[in-house]
Structure formats: C-alpha cells, structure tokens
Amino acid sequence: EIRAKCRRLQADHGLDLVVVDYLQLLHGAGRADTRANEISQISRSLKELARELRVPVIAGAQLSRAVETRNPHIPMLSDLRESGSIEQDADIVMFIYREDMYQRPQDWQDQHPDEPGNAHPTGLANIIVAKHRNGPTGSVTVRWVDKTASFQDLLLRPEPGYDGF
C-alpha cells in the first residue's frame, strides 16, 4: 500500500522524500513466521522502494528495552527492536540520546562532583551516527528545544571577536 501510494505521488507531483513514522507499526505483505522476519521483510521493502523511486526513505524505529538496563543508556545498533535486518538494510542509522531524560540535576551533580562546570545536561542531545555506509560514524551534541521539539546547532565556545548580541 505504501509503495503504490508513493509511486502515485511521484508520478503525479514528484516525490523527494519518504518518511515512515514507527517502522514496527507496519505490516508485511505476506505471511511471516515471526515478527522479526516480518520486520525484515518490511525493512527490505523500504530499501527497495528507495532504490526504485531514487529518493531517501527515513524510518523511525523502536528500540528494545535493553537500552534501559545499561548505564549510561546510550543506544547501540544491537538495540534496534525485532530485527537485525534494519541495521543491515539501512545506509545510515542514527540515534538521539538525551542524558537529561535519565538523571535529575541533583543525581547528576552527585555522580559528577569533580567535573569542571558540573552542569546537568538539560537541553542537550547527542545525535549519534551509529552506521554510515558511505561515511564516518560519530556523534554531535546539539541543543534540544523542548518547547518546539526541535534541535539547534550548539556553539560550544564563542567565535573569536564575538561580543554577543
């Protein structure tokens, strides 16, 4: 159904991007013996769709609960829920990690008493590029704006000659 709709949209209006919010809510076209196999089928289908239409496909996916049992709770590729094929099929896998979701300010200060600044990471997020088929992996810290549910570039140190506003 998604493939047919995307083909129609591309033919009628042009299509530059496909976004799937929550991959695990989709259902495969055929019968799969396990949910993991069904997710694998869906993941492959999205990859084929991207190639066929020559557009990027972004798919949001749920993580397993394993990430909640670790400390720190930084997500890893093995945390992708229900299928390793998501990792295999994807060209790029990115995670968002916000430390402030896991620690209250007082707990943070108790655990980091000797760190310079000792500031709780409220409003900060790490965007982690865990897989990049054609480029580097790593992470970047950005500002999380809760009010608008958006990210902003984070200036870690003032540029030379910058006096403020």
Image (cartoon, rainbow, N blue to C red):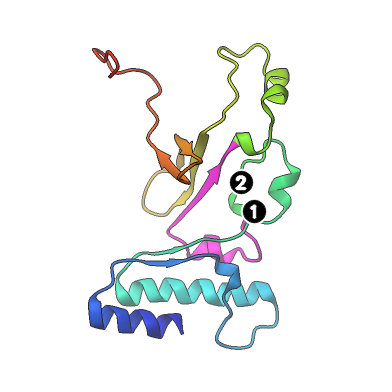
Q: Residues within 10 Å of mark 1 (few under 14, many from 20)?
A: some
Q: Residue at x 33, y 17 (%)?
A: 158
Quadrant placement of the C terminus:
top left
Q: CA distance from mark 1 to mark 2?
A: 6 Å
Q: Is residue 120 above or below residue 148?
A: above
Residue stretch in magenta: 78-98
Q: Residue at x 62, y 66 (%)?
A: 83
The x and y percentages for residue 85 are 56, 66
Q: Is residue 142 above or below residue 39?
A: above
| Pointer 1 with pointer 2, Cβ within 8 A | yes
| Residue type, label 1 | Asp
Residue holding disc 1: 79
Magenta stretch: includes residue 43:
no
Magenta stretch: includes residue 91:
yes
* Residue 140 in sight: no
The x and y percentages for residue 64 are 68, 56
Q: Is residue 154 above or below residue 47?
A: above
- Dot 1: what SS? helix
- Dot 2: what SS? loop
Residue holding disc 2: 75
Q: Residue at x 64, y 53 (%)?
A: 79
Q: Is residue 91 above or below residue 145?
A: below
The x and y percentages for residue 149 are 48, 46
Q: Which mark is residue 44?
A: none
Q: In screen coordinates, is 12 left or right of 139? A: left
